[in-house]
Structure formats: structure tokens, C-alpha cells
Image (cartoon, coloured by chain):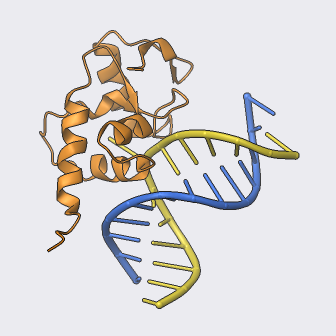
Chain colours: A orange, B yellow, C blue
Amino acid sequence: MITDPVPEDSQQRIWQVVAAIPRGKVASYGQVAELAGLPRAARLVGRILKNLPAGSKLPWHRVIRSNGKLAFATDSEQYHCQLDQLQAEGIAVINARVNPVYFLW
DNA sequence: TGAGTGACTTGAG
DNA sequence: ACTCAAGCCACTC
């Protein structure tokens, strides 16, 4: 019989892709989705990351928008947290935007 | 069942 | 550089 798509599997794949992002590099939601075998599922990636359990050790901060900006408002708590993590890895964020040179692609 | 929403992307104007 | 619209997947009401 045909097995179900099993959404949990996709979640597992996304986790693995995010975990595979090397230190000092970043990737966009769309890129992560594509690498996970889920093209155009950028929104799904965002949903999965939002659903991350605390202390998952997943480098979720390395996942940003395709335009180099973070997915949060610049005045939000999450934004500053992510910004801090990125700078801790030597990634420079200029004018609320990450230089494309840091992208995995 | 269907409209609304979201840590998104892309293209057009 | 800006806004708008359409497409995308999963969840909520």
C-alpha cells in the first residue's frame, strides 16, 4: 500500500539540513527547504523552527531570509537574540542585513 | 469545508 | 527601494 507522506519525516530532514550549516555561514528558508527535498516549502521551514524545543542545539540562527535580512522585526527580542548568535560566529550584520557572501550558496 | 494566518520566495510594476 | 500579488505548506477557527 502507499504509505503516508509522514510530515514528521520532513521535520527530521529540515533539522538535519539546518544542523549541517557550517559555522560562520547562513542559509535562507527556501534553500533549507530545497536541500531537505521540499522545494517551495520555505514557510514550512519557518513553522518547524518556531516549533523547535528549547535546547535543541540546532543552529536555527543561521537560517535567514533570502534578502539577507532576519525573519524578525528589528525591535523584537528574537531578532536581537539571533543577531547576537550570528555575531558570535563572526558574521557581520550591517544595517540589519547579512552580507550575501556569508550565504551557503 | 473554507477563509485566515505565518520565523517565506519570486516576479511585476 | 517600494508595494502588490500569487504560490507554497501546515495549522487554526
The answer to whether residue A82 is seen in the rendering is yes
| Left or right: A45 as drawn, with respect to A7 | right
The answer to whether residue A99 is seen in the rendering is no
| Left or right: A53 as drawn, with respect to A65 | left
| Left or right: A105 as drawn, with respect to A20 | right
Give A13 or B5, whichever is nearer the viewer.
A13
Q: In the rendered view of the protein, which quadrant contains the N terminus of chain A?
A: bottom left
Q: Percent x, y for residue A36? A: 29, 41
Q: Give the residue at x 43% y 12%.
A: A92
Residue A41 sits above or below residue A73 on the image: below
In this rendering, the count of numbered labels is 0
Q: Percent x, y for residue A90? A: 33, 9
Give C12 or C9, whichever is nearer the viewer.
C9
Q: Give the residue at x 42% y 20%.
A: A105
| Left or right: C3 as drawn, with respect to A8 | right
Residue that lies at the very extreme toward the top in this rendered image:
A90
Give A73 or A44, whichever is nearer the viewer.
A44
Q: Give the residue at x 18% y 37%.
A: A16
